[in-house]
Amino acid sequence: MTSRSSKVTARPSSEARAVARTQTLIKGQNGIGTVRKTTLPGGLRIVTETLPSVRSATFGIWAHVGSRDETAALNGATHYLEHLLFKGTNRRSALDISSALDAVGGEMNAFTAKEYTCYYARVLDTDLPLAIDVVCDMLTGSLILEEDVDVERGAILEEIAMTEDDPGDCVHDLFAHTMFGNNALGRPVLGTVDTVNALTADRIRRFYRKHYDPTHLVVACAGNIDHNKVVRQVRAAFEKTGALRSPDAQPIGPRDGSRTIRTSGKVELLGRKTEQAHVVLGMPGLARTDDRRWAMGVLNTALGGGMSSRLFQEVREKRGLAYSVYSYTSGFADCGLFGVYAGCRPSQVHDVLKLCRDELDHVAANGLTDDEIARAIGQLQGSTVLGLEDTGALMNRIGKSELCWGEQMSVDDMLDRIAAVTPDEVRSVARDILGQRPSLSVIGPLKDKQAARLHDAVA
């Protein structure tokens, strides 16, 4: 069993305002699962979780910037920058960066989301100092040269084309646009062909300088590691490039967001010559800080989170109308989405949509049974633990928690919170969320008469 601790120990410093502050956020058993946090002068936060039983370590840096922070003209800049940080620094070429990790059998990658970006490397514990030096160098010393911008533009345009060739993926971008329209949350993370072609090296460099300040970054490391050593190595790496130049700077807090306008009852159809029709039927969900998110997680699991879920049973098992059908939630700082996805033959799209809408309406009006809720709680607890079985998942958890919530929750506390969800809480959130008028996004080769009937699903 783990417990929380808020004891703070300060490292000595000649300047009282420039002291590194260290806290034990979660105290594990015999050091296993202990989560510690140090805030360096300059506002850089370093969070670690110790797991002595493994021989690996995952090191990541989370940036408080995503596609939500882009103007319409800058759409795609965050993801573009993710590519460019691998292209070289004053100390390393692009080949030096990739070969350094390849030479020790390590893995290095990055991902961009709507509200954050993460760069990470997974290595043997003995090679962690190398991973720290390489990733920190990339984040603080990127050159962003004109020629690299031009070369990477082609790669990003191919990535956009690849996404558009996968309608099962593309339909989720379409659904975000259906729900949020042309504001930042409704635009694709990758950008568009037009916006990517319009981005220049100068504009991307300005974006980089604004959003990659240490106060906007969280370093996260998990595995067979020593917190104090990680802190020293990260500090040394950042000081090499002069990144910690403002000792009195304070880290920014979790994103507040602004009240995002979402639509209801809207239908968007993107005609494509595909073998299947890909549909997402959904409505506004919950912000990631909403206390009801635990009940929403149970509801989502029972509705479309597994083979025993209502949607899977009704659409696939009983009728064979779709191979893939599931529900999902997305939580942002101030809002969220709930969606149901299905891929089916175009001739079956209206039957699938009617079944999904009927199930959502039924659960909104009548709730779930106690047995369904109990099964969903067990499934959610199991998947939570199984999803944290490697150092990469642990790094993701502590890094995202610090960046998005500003706090850490132990696995035991998470399991307790899931177990504490009551049937009444699930039924209440079902009424609130599923009782709203849905919107619909469809990609597929629907004929005019079929397309005209799509509004029936959201009426």
Image (tube, grey):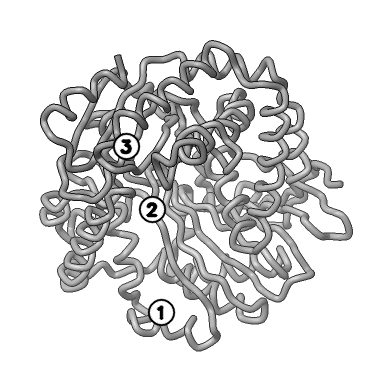
Element type where label 2 sits in the image: strand
Q: Residue furthest bottom?
A: 103
Question: In the displayed structure, does residue 69 sit left or right of residue 363?
Answer: left
Q: CA distance from mark 2 to mark 1?
A: 19 Å
Q: Residue at x 73, y 46 (%)?
A: 411
Q: From what the image shows, is residue 305 above or below residue 95?
A: above
Q: From what the image shows, is residue 190 above or below residue 309?
A: below
Residue at image mark 3:
279
Tag 1 or tag 3, which sits nearer the N-term? 1
Q: State the image quarter where residue 158 is shown.
A: bottom left
Residue at image mark 2:
112
Q: Residues within 10 Å of mark 3 (few under 14, many from 20)?
A: many
Q: Residue at x 44, y 67 (%)?
A: 109
| Residue 24 drawn at (x, y percent) | 76, 49
Question: In the displayed structure, does residue 281 sit left or right of residue 338?
Answer: left
Task: Say which amino acid is labelled 2.
Answer: Thr
